[in-house]
Image: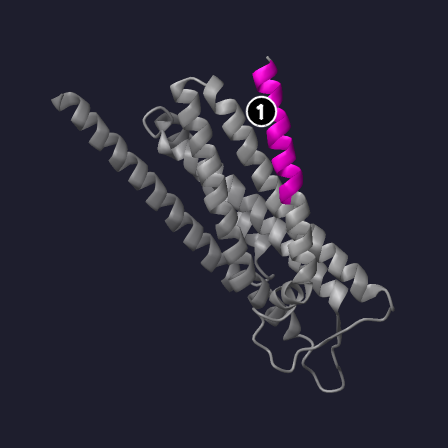
Amino acid sequence: MVKYLIEIQNKFILLIFTLSSTLIVCYLYKDVLLFLITQMHLNDENLYFIFTDVTELFTLYFHIIIFILMQIVLWYLSFHVFTFLSPALYLREFKLAKSIFFNTTCFWFLSISLSSYILIPFGWNFFLSFQIQEGFYFEARVNNFFKFYTDIYYITLTYCQSLAFLFIFLRDVGKNHFHINKYRKFHYYLFLIFSTIITPPDLISQVVVTILICIIYEIILLTALFNFLLNGSKMATN
């Protein structure tokens, strides 16, 4: 019992150290973080932001630091929970927990790339296209853009994590074969809803994203089925 309490204490100290060091690094590079969020992925030399309150820029820096800090600390916390619980798990439970942690981490990085390089620039340009009219001039507040950024990021993160658990479910295609066939059309319907939420309100974007997700879904399913048949043939030969 004392051994586990000491381990919890050590992990808590490491977590506090991670939180403190990340906070310091984010504060020292707050201007770089502001550039990465507001300017890097939009590719518009004429773009600029305004602020209408003397404390607005300070508040924005604070929100950006907290935003980055929460992403890193939550991942580090989940890593410590996994390493703490893994010795007490059976082999099958350990493989499942390892698969969940690995896949959710990979899909987390996918959500960052997808939101930063595709969805946010495309969505920004789509909505901005309605403002380019004679007599209308658009000046974006930096706080509003940060809210736009975080909203799209959290939506993308939520659905990417849902895809991660779907991927874990599809990997065991042998046991879940009946449920996959039964709810396959329902999965396509969920993909359509997902595409409608994360894309701008035009039909072409929704159709393209839906088709891409369905293709990824079928590739994952075929890969899982191939691995299941390959493992079954190996077991039969042995």
Q: Nearer the viewer, residue 229 or 201?
A: 229
* Residue 16 among those drawn in magenta: yes
Q: Where does the image place residue 59, in percent across and percent down from the top left?
A: 80, 59
Can you say whether 55 is above or below 181 in the image?
Answer: below
Disc 1 marks which amino acid? Glu
Which residue sits at x=63%, y=37%? 15
Q: Where does the image place residue 66, in percent across and percent down from the top left?
A: 71, 51
Q: Where does the image place residue 167, in percent across and percent down from the top left?
A: 42, 38
* Residue 228 among those drawn in magenta: no
Bounds of the magenta segment: 2-18
**Image position of 144 (left or right of 37):** right
**Image position of 136 (left or right of 157):** right
Q: Nearer the viewer, residue 26 or 211?
A: 26
* Residue 27 in sight in this render: yes
Q: Nearer the viewer, residue 12 or 106?
A: 12
Can you say whether 161 is above or below 215 in the image?
Answer: above
Color style of the picture? one colour
